Amino acid sequence: MNYPSRIACLTDETVETLYLLGEQRRVVGISGYSVRPPEARREKPKVSAFTSAKIDKIVALEPDLVLGFSNLQAEIAAQLIREGIAVHVFNQRSVEGILRMITLLGAMVGAPEKAAALTMQYRQRLEIIRAEAAALPRRPRVYFEEWDAPIISGIRWVAELIEVAGGDDCFAELSTEQSAKQRIIADPSEVVRRAPDIIIGSWCGKKFRPDQVAARPGWHEIPAVKNGRVFEIKSCDILQPGPAALTDGLEQMRRIIRQWSEQTGH
């Protein structure tokens, strides 16, 4: 069977997955935001941002497959389809969805066994960390902030990884909403009322500012702010719905929650 041999990836997670599967030779173009693995940024031409792309540059690469993510890249996908290019747009929003993405991508490039081994490795790690978390005397309340203006809470896979690591997402009910607009916290004082023990920020594309968070009206009353437990996890580690979130992102959450438990005696 002839599998795609010239793939343009419009987001980071498919690039990283193809490299982890040993299929990096198939990648001919990547997103300008791609940072994982570092060698991809050095080796491959940049052909897109997140909601925009250099259509002429992609066409010139003569890809036999372009991989995108979510409705936010729907217009890019439509333009490429009109150019006669095959496009697949993933839409994973959960941990299980990330694992399915890896499985499907492995099948698309003729590497199903390698994809199965990779997903099994991730599942085993998730279960080890979940079992460790079950031994915690108390689960901390965790507020995850994806954006600051407006304030947006964490997406579903983030909420699920908080749970795996031993925390309870303060806004778990919003995490299952499909769009970021539906996760806007209109009243910032609601965060104060929910009194998170830990705040984790990951402002997609810009540096998280704990000082700005602490200075919000009334937020000095939040236990996380009072006790200096306001942390950043970089967006490339946690807001990329792929291997990064299941490895580096989850491990950072685990460390933050373990530290809280050890320091508070909970």
Image: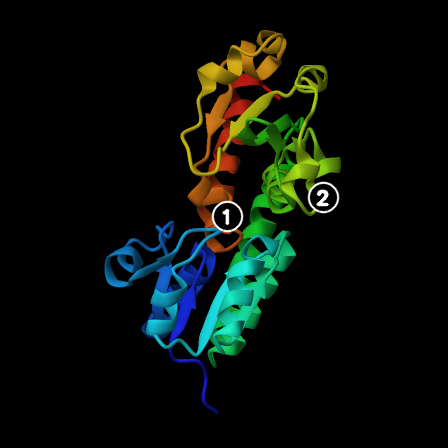
Q: Quadrant of residue 60?
A: bottom left
Residue under the point 43% across and 79% down: 64
Q: Percent position (x, y) of residue 18?
A: 41, 67
Labelled disc at residue 93: none
155 or 257, which is in the foreground? 155
Q: Left or right: where does residue 99 sit relative to residue 176?
A: left
The residue that disc 2 covers is 177
* Closer-to-camera residue (250/9): 9
Q: Camera-side residue: 191 or 96?
A: 191
Q: Which mark is residue 245?
A: 1
Between disc 2 and disc 1, the foreground one is 2
Earlier in the chain: of badge 2 and badge 1, it is 2
Callout 1: 10 Å neighbours few (<14), some, many (20+)?
A: many
Disc 2 from disc 1: Cα separation:
19 Å
- In the rendered image, the quadrant that contains the C terminus is top right
Residue type highlighted by circle 2: Glu
Q: Amino acid at mark 1?
A: Ala
Foreground of the two, 213 or 149: 149
Task: Please state the horizontal and vertical placement of residue 90, each as a whole percent of the image.
Answer: 58, 62
Above or below, 201 against 178 in this view is above
